[in-house]
Structures are given as C-alpha cells and as structure tokens.
Amino acid sequence: MTKYEELTDEAYSRGLKVKEKHLHADLIRQGLSEQQRLQKLRSVAYYQLHSLESSHIANRLKQNIQKRIEQD
C-alpha cells in the first residue's frame, strides 16, 4: 500500500467517525433513548459497510484494520 493510499484511507476513516459523532449528538438532541440511538447508529453503520463492501476503499480499510489487529 502506498503512502497516498494510507493517507486516503485514514482521511476517509476519520471522516466517517466525525459523521458518526455528529449523528450521535443529533440523536441525543432529539431525545432518543440510549437503546434507540444504538439501534440507529448500528443501522447506519451496517448500511455504510454494506454499500462500501465492494469498493476498493473498503478493501483497503479492511486490510488496514487487520494490520492494526496483528500489531496489537
């Protein structure tokens, strides 16, 4: 994996985390219970993973995650 690909993957991953935090904050503002928020966040995460499943970015992210697991 090239340095550019690593940076691209990292930026994409951070972008998803930021969006997830904003969504979570919005769900709290809406007054949803913890269980309701968790269900919605899981649903969004599932949709994101499913839609990215065949993309090259998702494959690289999976490889990146696997490397990090092996390092720990």
Image (cartoon, helix red, strand yellow):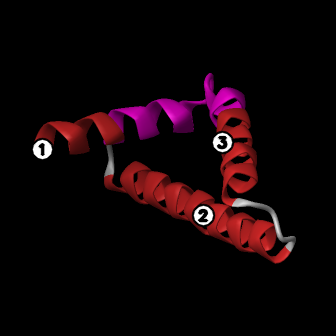
Q: Which mark is residue 42?
A: 3
Residue 28 occupies quadrant: bottom right
Does residue 30 show up magenta in the picture?
no
Kindly report the distance in space between the C-alpha atoms of the residues bearing marks 3 and 2. 17 Å
Q: Do the numbered discs 3 and 1 sit on residues whose CB atoms are within 8 Å?
A: no
Residue reaching furthest to the top = 54
| Residue position for label 2 | 15
Task: Give the foreground label among 3 and 1.
Answer: 3
Residue 23 percent location from the top left of the image: 74, 65
Does residue 52 show up magenta in the picture?
yes
N-terminal label among 3 and 1: 3
Residue at 41 percent of width and 60 percent of height? 7
Mark 3, residues whose alpha carbon is within 10 Å: few (<14), some, or many (≥20)? few
Q: Amino acid at mark 1?
A: Gln
Mark 2, residues whose alpha carbon is within 10 Å: few (<14), some, or many (≥20)? few
> Of helix, strand and loop, which one carries label 2?
helix
Residue at 68 percent of width and 50 percent of height? 35
